[in-house]
Amino acid sequence: MADDNRVARKAPRVVRIDHRQVRVLAHPLRIRLLGALRVHGAATATTLAELLDTNSGATSYHLRQLAEVGLVVEDPDRGHGRQRWWRAAHDVTNFEPTDFDDDPDARAAIEWIQGTQVRLLAEHAERWFAAQDQWSPAWRDAFGMGDIFLTIPAARLQALEAELWQVLERYRDEADPTEPGAEQIAVFVAAYPMLKGK
């Protein structure tokens, strides 16, 4: 029986990005714009410019570039006159690094995007460390990170990652943002080889 108190959720809109999309997305402001639209919802170029501390002309230009490859779309239910509202076309972006092995420019773009994800994780952690004393003990104990070292083949690692994503998606789908004490959080999943050397 479904929990009547749970907020009804639509299945997330997922895109497996192609060569053209990855090249367009590999820009500091564009990746921030797409992230802001996913986190905060539909917005105008002016609102996004204020949020991201940039100017609305640049924001508007880069939104149009993202729209050209289908990563953002105009929100038809909003906007009056010349005011344009934008929203993310997808909730989740998927890719495999090998999708771009035949295209050096797209491969460089995806490597830049992955590096940006690592830097974003570091920025999130630094902001958390600076603000953690403002949070309750329960939240301070719930947040954090850890690591584990495994010796497994690639197929087992892929199975592990798929299982972890299923758990995260289940928690996302069951989440009720109106639940008392609910906060928006980011969960990062990363696996890298233990490279030899320094």
Image (spheres, helix red, strand yellow):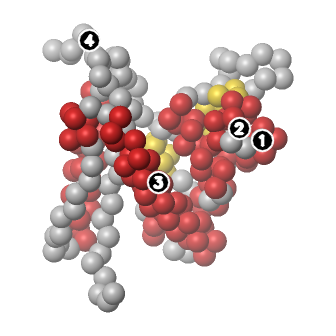
Answer left or right for 88 relative to 86. Answer: left
Tell me the residue at 18%/64% (across/down). Answer: 148
- Return the disc, 3 or 4, that comes first in the chain's sequence: 4
Residue 5's label in the rendered image is 4
Q: Position of residue 181 (x, y in %)?
A: 29, 22
**Which type of secondary structure does the marked residue at label 4 adopt?**
loop
Which amino acid lies under the numbered mark 4 shown in the image of this protein? Asn
Which residue carries the number 3 mark?
Answer: 123
Mark 1 surroundings within 10 Å by alpha-carbon count, few (fewer than 14), some (14 through 19), many (20 or more): some
Query: Foreground residue, 13 or 78?
Result: 78
Q: Position of residue 105 (x, y in %)?
A: 64, 71
Tell me the residue at 35%/34% (across/down). Answer: 134
Tell me if I can see residue 42 in this picture: yes
Which amino acid lies under the numbered mark 1 shown in the image of this protein? Asn
- From mark 3 to mark 4, how far is it between C-alphas? 35 Å
Q: Position of residue 21 (x, y in %)?
A: 62, 54
Which residue carries the number 2 mark?
Answer: 49
- Return the disc, 1 or 2, that comes first in the chain's sequence: 2
Which residue carries the number 1 mark?
Answer: 55
